[in-house]
Image (cartoon, helix red, strand yellow):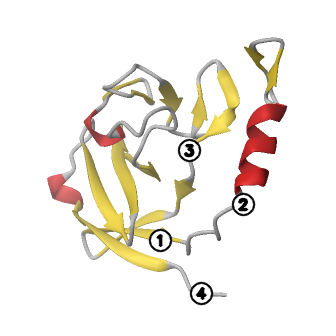
Amino acid sequence: MTEPVTVSAGSLEALPPGAATVVQAGDRAVAVFNVDGDLVAVDGRCLHRGGPLAEGFVRDGVVTCPWHWWRYDLRTGERLGAPWLRLRRYPVRVEAGQIVVEVPPAEPPASIREVLLRHAARWRGGKETAP
């Protein structure tokens, strides 16, 4: 198994409470938020259409995607109203004033069959349901 990648997200001083930034770990975008002094790192793209979450509006620990207004609880990664949909969260820490995010290696891609089965399992009678 490949080791996690450690990525610098800049200085803590440059990310005051309420601010966000995005870093790249290979082909993966990771959004880092300062939520009232607590650092949170999650997938940088919305699960809906890939909107840039670091550009979203944050209030009370919830980020709203700027493209289509999907909302996520940053502390859990859950999409509000559909908690079975979650952003990945990443360990984040401060070392010598620098924000450091630990990003695990990407999982191997699922086969198209697995993706379709997972997606179909969530839909029953035209309504999205928990798997």
Q: Is residue 11 above or below residue 50?
A: below
Residue 43 placement (x, y as % from top left): 46, 50
Which residue is at the front of the view, 77 or 120? 120
Q: Is residue 54 above or below residue 32?
A: above
Residue 74 placement (x, y as % from top left): 49, 38
Q: Which residue is mark 4?
A: 2
- The quadrant holding residue 56 is top left
Check disc 3 and give the amino acid type: Leu
- Quarter of the image with the N terminus in it: bottom right
| First-in-chain label (1 vs 3) | 3
Are there few (<14), some (14-19), or many (20+) residues within 10 Å of tag 3? many
Q: Residue at x 65, y 35 (%)?
A: 85
Rounded to the nearest whole Å, what is the CA distance between mark 3 and mark 4?
22 Å
Label 4 near label 3: C-beta < 8 Å? no
Q: Which residue is mark 1?
A: 102
| First-in-chain label (1 vs 2) | 1
Label 2 near label 3: C-beta < 8 Å? no
| First-in-chain label (3 vs 2) | 3
Q: Nearer the viewer, mark 4 or mark 1?
A: 4
| First-in-chain label (3 vs 4) | 4
Residue 121 placement (x, y as % from top left): 84, 33
Are there few (<14), some (14-19), or many (20+) residues within 10 Å of tag 1? some
Q: Nearer the viewer, mark 1 or mark 3?
A: 3
Q: Which residue is mark 3?
A: 87
Q: Nearer the viewer, mark 4 or mark 2?
A: 2
Label 2 near label 4: C-beta < 8 Å? no
- The quadrant holding residue 129 is top right
